[in-house]
Amino acid sequence: MRYKNIFFLSLTLGLLLTVKFFLVRESFLINVQGRAELLSANLQKGDLMSFSSKPIKKSKIIAVFGKVKSTESDVLIPLKRLSKKKLITYTNSEGVFNFNLKPGIYTFFILNGNNAYLNSFDGKGYFKSYKIFSKVDDIIITVISKSYF
C-alpha cells in the first residue's frame, strides 16, 4: 500500500511538471505575422499609376533562423543552401501568414520551385532579416517578377 501511494504521488508530480514545462515553453513563443504580395508595374511605358498589388494566396512561406547570405544579390537561393533550422507555413486567401517563433533573428522567404525567393536585402550582402523579440506584424514579402522598371 505504501509503495502504491509513493508511485501515484510520483506519477502525479511527474505529470504536473510535464504540463508546467509545456506551458512555460509555449509562453516563450512570439506571434509573427506578415503578408506576401505580387507587385505588378510597368514603368517603361511611363505610366506611374500602373502599380498594382495583389495578395499571394496559398503559398509556402519559410522562416529561417538567423541571417542568410545572398549570392551576388540574387533574389533566389536554393532550398538546400538554407539552414536545417527552418519553419514552414502557408499564406491564407488574403496573402497573410503567421508563425509562432522563439526569440531570435529570422529571415523570411516565399517558396518558388526548389528555391526560396526574397527581393529585400540589408545592404551588407545578406537578405533582409528581422529581430523577433516581441510581437511583429509588419513583415512584407513582395514578389516583383512581373514588373518592369
Image (cartoon, grey):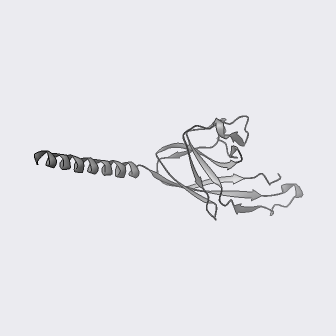
Q: Is residue 65 left or right of residue 57?
A: left
Residue 50 image point, x, y percent: 81, 63
Residue 16 image point, x, y percent: 27, 51
Residue located 68% across and 36% down the image: 70
Residue 27 image point, x, y percent: 39, 52
Q: Is residue 145 left or right of residue 11?
A: right
**Relative vertical location of residue 49 with respect to residue 19 in this rendering, above or below:** below
Residue 101 image point, x, y percent: 49, 49
Q: Residue furthest left?
A: 2
Q: Residue furthest right?
A: 45
Quarter-of-image position of residue 64: top right
The foreground one among 121 and 77 is 77
The foreground one among 142 and 59 is 59
Residue located 32% across and 51% down the image: 19
Q: Residue furthest front?
A: 1
Q: Is residue 97 left or right of residue 26?
A: right
**Relative vertical location of residue 140 with respect to residue 54 in this rendering, above or below:** above
Residue located 65% across and 52% down the image: 141
Q: How many marks?
A: 0
**Relative vertical location of residue 119 with respect to residue 70 in this rendering, above or below:** below
